[in-house]
Image (cartoon, rainbow, N blue to C red):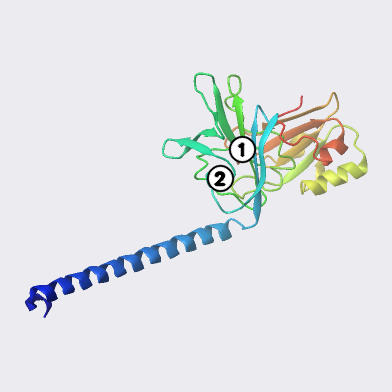
Amino acid sequence: MCGRAPRSRACVCRWRGSLEQREVSFRRLAALVLVALAVAGCDEARHGGGTATLWVTRDRGAHVMVDATVPAGQTLIRALRSRAKVKTRYGGRFVQAIDGVEGSLGKRHDWFWFVNGLAGDRSAAEYRLHAGDVAWWDYRDWTHDADLPVVVGAFPEPFLHGYGGKTRPAAVLVTRPVEASNLDALVRLIHAKGTFRRVAAVPRGWNILELVPGAPRFTAHQRVTGGPSSPIVLTFAGDVGKLLAGGFARRFSVP
């Protein structure tokens, strides 16, 4: 028995025992790594695989810093770190700086994020990207609009992919003359369930693309005040052809 062995044999036994313990620890660590990888893989599969779009801009989209395609299934903060140098606070839950551009409470400038044009309601470390998502970080002065729940610059989002992988039925509300071919194209583009002439006729929980007369403008608001999953209205006046061509990318609103 090892306990009765001479000192040299006891040392060998202890060495062998230590080695065996290390091997067991290594096997356990390897097993934990495999489990973690499997969980991550399941998360990616559950969130659709595929890819998402990542934008990083300044001043309401006026200056583009990053325009990239990233794998879906990962967290928004991980996707951001893969394309930019990121400085965080509060245990990695809050983005303080991206590529050296740093937020400041005193100057009222900070980083904000949207997914498919909808303002995030949680830490970017908790939001997992779904296939087709448009994730958008913007650094801006928030003096007059700290609360900005929806913007137009990811159109045709949020009609296609919504928020958190959940979408709402869509409608086109028409209160101006629109060429039939353009109207049909818009209906197809946002997967609308129909066109309407009166807002009261559109079911309460639906998202709306509203075509109105007047000077060119493109704005957004929530139909019902709430989080990013609330129904929204995008109101557009102007050249529908330009809207179809994606002429308002990375704009908060027009004018």
Real-space CA distance between mark 1 and mark 2, rounded to the nearest whole angstrom: 10 Å
Local secondary structure at mark 2? helix
Image coordinates of residue 30 in percent, x first then y, are: 39, 65
Label 1 amino acid?
Phe
Residue at (35% x, 68% y) in the render = 27
Label 2 amino acid?
Leu
Outermost residue, front side: 8
Residue at (82% x, 37% y) in the render = 243
Q: Mark 2: few, some, or many residues within 10 Å (few <14, many ≥20)?
A: many
User: Which is nearer the N-term, disc 1 or disc 2?
Assistant: 2
Between 46 and 91, the one lying in front of the other is: 91
Between 73 and 34, the one lying in front of the other is: 34
Tag shown at residue 76: 2
Image quadrant where residue 222 sits: top right
Residue at (54% x, 21% y) in the render = 108
Residue ID for mark 1: 114
Q: Give the quarter of the figure containing the N terminus.
A: bottom left
Image quadrant where residue 234 sits: top right
Tell me: residue 16, above or below residue 68: below
Q: Give the quarter of the figure containing the C terminus.
A: top right
